[in-house]
Image: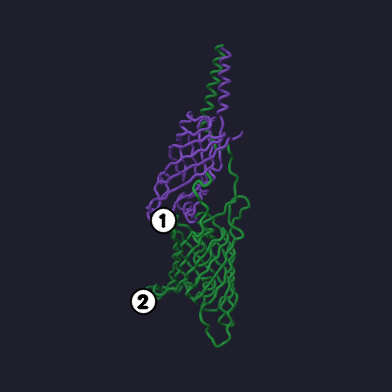
Amino acid sequence: MKNKFLIITVAVLISSSSFGQKYFTKTGKINFDATTASSPEKIEGINRTATCVVDTKTGNMQFALLMKGFEFERALMEEHFNENYVESHKFPKAEFKGAISNNEAVNYSKDGAYIIKVKGKLTMHGETKDVETDGKLVIQNGKITATADFNVLLADFKVSIPGLVADKVAKTAKISVTCSLEPLKG
Amino acid sequence: MKKLSFFIFLLLFLFSGISVSAQDEDLLKLVGEEKPTKEITKYAFKSPRVINSHSMEFLNPGTMDFRILHRFGPLDQGYKSLFGLDQASMRMGFDFGILQNLMVGVGRSTYKKELDAFIKFAPIRQSKGPWSSPVTLALVSGMTMNGLDWADPSRKNFFTSKLGYYFQAIIGRKFSEALTLQVSPTMVHNNLVPLQSDPNNIYAIGVGGRIKLSQRIAFTWDYSHVVVGMPDSGYYHPLSVGFDIETGGHVFQLHFSNATGMNERAFITETTGQWGKAEVRFGFNLSRVFQIKKKKHSKHADK
């Protein structure tokens, strides 16, 4: 009896340490696209310095990025993005805090591709909204590549589009995420 | 035995409690905060010009600013010439952003058919983070060339007589999103002046600023005080006040000014209007920025 409990305790401790692995990146890519059919040019920016941490034990997933880190092909678009739309001087950061809801379906110790469901809260421009999306995890040689595409309604985040350009900027922006995660040591 | 099993259950319970609370932990803290990096304070003005004067702001590298400037006639002409709108003087200019802190430009004004060109460089830019500076220091050097025919073709004329130069230092600070102020000591040199008593070198101090009223509208002013070399009569210190209005790709600068000239030599040394006598003109600057060299950008390029 005594032994049984000991074994259970040890097993719990071992399992929690072996599955407690966390993965991270500081060079995650987040692409932002608000182009519509009537846009005179591509309205698209990319941020290559997003931080992302995934806890494989709990399935928790968090992202953070600096809004000023979005790069646009046209400097003027970048200026308008920062100055007039997302007001990055007032709201410098965007964050996502959530979890992989089907985390038990992913075997992190085995190479393979898994479709995941991610649910959480996205904070941007001072507003927080629930976001839910499907994504993909590819596990290969102890590294994880995470990708996801989802849409956000700009009005949800109080990003206002002036009437003059209302038909040239999409009301929903398409967000694409690509992160190559490496094991977090320590 | 029972005591032990209870203890172990308690342990397990506590343990599970820890792992539940761990779900709320801030994972991002684990990777550490980003080191602060030096960041240039941008967007001090909507445009590289306050109204007439150069501003502390620069064009982005790889962009061209096509500027069309209009100055109408004085308001005191009244209704007969629609408060000055019947006559107009203009300057067309092309400014190029080369580096974050280097730009050049050329322009031509109808006033004296004058060509002008300048180079503007900022050795110090206002920034945040390590090794930052609270102000921007920008240096401008410009040249003008009068395009009119010689007043007296019979005498011996020198090409250099058509030329003028100006040198300016701009010290500016964006105090907040709403307020930007700058001071700009300037020297203008005319190779040839009309009268022997007129000085060739004129020194002035410019004071300009911006108060942002909304995301897309700002109140601006631009004044140059001629300190040394102001002729005894007939000339005044140029003062312009106006609004910057940003509409997508354009910036409209609508203003009132007692100056007609649209380059430094002309508006600092040859302003003949007087604010007190309503010899003020309506004018506008239209600025359209084109991206002529695209930044490297491709979606998931190194996926």
**Image location (x, y in percent) of residue B230:** 56, 75
Q: Nearer the viewer, residue B134 or A145?
A: A145
Q: Is residue B13 left or right of residue A165?
A: right
Q: Which chain is green?
A: B
Distance between the alpha carbons at the discs numbered 2 and 1? 43 Å
Q: Residue furthest left?
A: B80
Colour in which chain A is drawn: purple
Three-letter amino acid code of the residue under disc 2: Lys
Give me the disc on residue A119: none
> Residue tagged by mark 1?
A40
Q: Going 58% across and 24% down the picture, which residue do you hit? A: A14
Residue B187 occupies quadrant: bottom right
Q: Residue furthest bottom?
A: B154
Q: Going 58% across and 54% down the picture, which residue do you hit? A: B127
- Name the secondary structure under disc 1: loop
A129 shown above or below B72:
above
Q: Nearer the viewer, residue B225 or B60?
A: B60
- Is disc 2 in contact with disc 1, using a CB cutoff of under 8 Å? no
Q: Is residue A34 left or right of residue B54?
A: left
Residue B121 occupies quadrant: bottom right
Q: Residue furthest right?
A: B131
Mark 2 or 1: the one toward you: 1
**Image location (x, y in percent) of residue B211:** 48, 59
Chain letter of the residue carrying label 1: A
**Image location (x, y in percent) of residue A73:** 49, 54
- Name the secondary structure under disc 2: helix
> Residue tagged by mark 2?
B80
